[in-house]
Amino acid sequence: MTILSYIEDIEKNEPIKLNQKEITELLNTQKQNVLRLMKVASDRKYTDNITYSKNMFIPLTEVCRNSCGYCTFKKESNDPDVILLKDKDEIIEELKISQKYGCKEALITFGEQADEDELVLKVLNEKGFENMTDYLHDVCEEIVDKTNLLPHSNCGVISYNELKKLKEVNISMGMMIESSSHRLMETIAHKNSPGKNPKLRLEVISNAGRLNIPYTTGILIGIGENKDEIARSLLDIKNLHSKYGHIQEVIIQNFKSKPRTPMEFHDEPTLLDMIRTVSVAKLLFDDVSIQVPPNLNYHTNQIFLLCGADDWGGISPLTKDHVNPYDKWPQISELEKFSIELGFKLKERLAIYDKYINEEYLNQKLLSKTELLKKQLK
């Protein structure tokens, strides 16, 4: 079959069962077929709502075992400006301030397996904890008990038992797979990042599925992968979702070059790369939200709504994007304008999607609080 044949079948509402080769060919769509690809993807949208979550971004520690070629988040533990371990009382105070701005999501992220660092471990021990998972659990429990926000944690590669423990105090969790390509482990992007091993990351997402944890994942394009590797990455996520049904959103994130990183002068993906990838992702995941980070694509955000994207992700009225500090969040009023101009409605959501707000995915304590917060959404 040709690319045109694939698109024609989709236009007829034929069932979509694409293999890796076919996905790769769609990712190489050219000329007028690009517009047709965008349209068939957009037509797969099951809602006119474009969603976002109002959050507070909490970097628990900036120490990380990985040293990715594009990262500005990580700091060494002996850096005088490092967040070695953010204090729980400070976190709670900041979250109470964020309540006044209507924030409902406490987005907690930190460097992977930071407790392998002796300085981080020393501070943990001084606070009475043996590892980051126990400290994170304590922090999240306090957030649930003492604030009007609900935790969503991004922990990187952790074990099944750690996921099980954190499920008790998180309404959802997440981790980007970034890429299924083992080849990238030998490149400037991931050669110093053992936690970016695709096998390890897919195992985490699989374990989250086994535990019924609503999960956010996605891919990072433009870090040296080829189209076939993008196709493989999307299919790997698709296969896990088909098995467990726990993937609530897939992020298509574009690499952005950042100063003073090994990949500072590496080419960023083109707009066409993003258009094709977002469109194909929507075709593969017609029952899952597709998110494109709005702060990384300020001038092209509306185009991705025409490719089937239906979520802006977490937006904070108070904190910067600590992972992409050079790209400011758009104002919520701007996102509303972007959405309305195309005939969509902007709708606030929680860090857990509606279909997961039930006893299958949440314990009674989290379920009760989530249902209460859901009633407060505008």
Image (cartoon, rainbow, N blue to C red):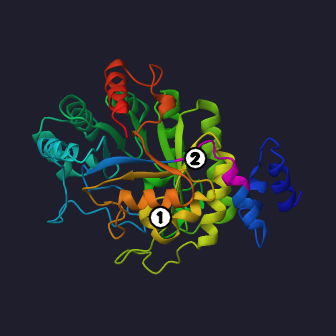
Write down the residue under mark 2.
48
Under circle 1, the secondary element is loop
Taking the spot 53% from the left edge, 61% from the top edge, the residue there is 341
Using residue 136 as the reference point, say whether residue 81 is left or right of it: left
Q: Position of residue 106 (x, y in %)?
A: 29, 43
Using residue 10 as the reference point, say whether residue 145 is left or right of it: left
Q: Is residue 78 above or below residue 51?
A: below
Answer with the quarter of the image where residue 62 lies: bottom left
- The answer for how far apart the CA atoms under marks 2 and 1 are is 42 Å
Answer with the quarter of the image where residue 133 lies: top left
The 10 Å Cα crowd at callout 1, few under 14, some 14 to 19, many 20 or more, is some
- Visible in this render: residue 85? yes
Q: Position of residue 264 (x, y in %)?
A: 42, 78
Of residues 97 and 85, which is closer to you in this image? 97
- Visible in this render: residue 113? no
Using residue 286 as the reference point, say whether residue 261 is left or right of it: left
Is 191 a magenta residue?
Answer: no
Under circle 2, the secondary element is loop
For the image, the number of numbered tags is 2
Range drawn in magenta: 40-49
Of residues 183 and 91, which is closer to you in this image? 91
Which quadrant would the C terminus be assigned to in this image? top left
Write down the residue under mark 1.
191
Q: Position of residue 99 (x, y in %)?
A: 22, 42
Is 47 a magenta residue?
Answer: yes
Using residue 67 as the reference point, say whether residue 49 is left or right of it: right
Taking the spot 44% from the left edge, 19% from the top edge, the residue there is 359
